[in-house]
Amino acid sequence: GENVEQHPSTLSVQEGDSAVIKCTYSDSASNYFPWYKQELGKGPQLIIDIRSNVGEKKDQRIAVTLNKTAKHFSLHITETQPEDSAVYFCAPGNYQLIWGAGTKLIIKP
Amino acid sequence: DVKVTQSSRYLVKRTGEKVFLECVQDMDHENMFWYRQDPGLGLRLIYFSYDVKMKEKGDIPEGYSVSREKKERFSLILESASTNQTSMYLCASSFGRGSYEQYFGPGTRLTVT
């Protein structure tokens, strides 16, 4: 079946530094590449997504880059802030999403 | 704003009980999903539905069933709860085919003793 791997599983960065989370997938039919953020006690929420015809997308401090040939895409967060602390999930797919195991991002003050 | 609500935040049930988890969305979305979330495993799809009275199995449907009698409501049923069904259950909805963003409820933490 489809395989999605997310790395690292935990990432601790100093406030103000950048964070990068990588997601690799196996299903070449995937054409939608989202990142979700899950805060404590809440369901996941979409923060950024990209379609397969685009290589990079940016929204203020967050960006997603896609390498479809190598079957991986990454989440980049710059100038990290305490409110960025959460669990982040990649979920490549199309009408069905295949979820990674999650990355716990810790922002150290 | 899209709102997805789940009937309970916390639920404790005994082994063998029949359990109903209810989910309601208020944005006229076509698609609805039930996931379970366990540490280190991400979200795993149990069942989904693209239309009223329509359902399709996800990756882990065993031990579960669903009902969608109205467009806005999607119910997950545990026919005979077991301890290995202790988990966080998340409901989600999305607008329709071609629209992939999923909107989630806050989750129900179910404990089966």
Image (cartoon, coloured by chain):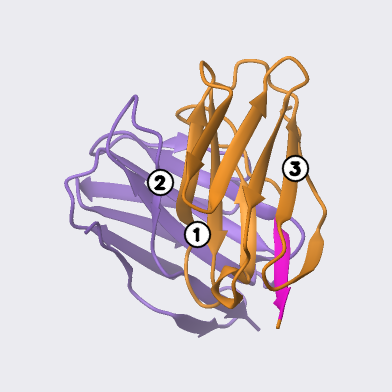
Asked whether disc 2 touches disc 1, contact meaning CB atoms under 8 Å apart, the reply is yes
Asked whether disc 3 touches disc 1, contact meaning CB atoms under 8 Å apart, the reply is no
Q: Amino acid at mark 3?
A: Lys
Residue marked by disc 1:
A44
Circle on res. B3: none
Magenta stretch, main secondary structure class: strand
Given the image, what chain letter belongs to the residue carrying mark 2? B
Given the image, what chain letter belongs to the residue carrying mark 1? A
Residue A93 lies, with reference to residue A9, above or below; the image says above
- Residue B68 is situated, as x and y percent measured from the top left of the image, at 28, 47
- Residue B21 is situated, as x and y percent measured from the top left of the image, at 40, 67
- Mark 3 Cα-neighbour bin, 10 Å: few <14, some 14–19, many ≥20: some
In which quadrant of the rendered view does residue B98 lie? top left
Query: Would you say residue B80 is visible in this rendering?
Result: no
- Residue A87 is situated, as x and y percent measured from the top left of the image, at 64, 64
- Which of the two discs, 3 and 1, sits closer to the camera? 3
Mark 2 lies on a secondary structure that is: loop
Which one is nearer the viewer's eye here, B109 or B84?
A: B109
- Which quadrant of the rendered structure holds the N terminus of chain A? top right
Residue at image position (64%, 72%) is B86
Residue at image position (58%, 58%) is B36
Residue marked by disc 2:
B102
Given the image, what chain letter belongs to the residue carrying mark 3? A
Tell me the colour chain B is drawn in. purple
Residue marked by disc 3:
A22
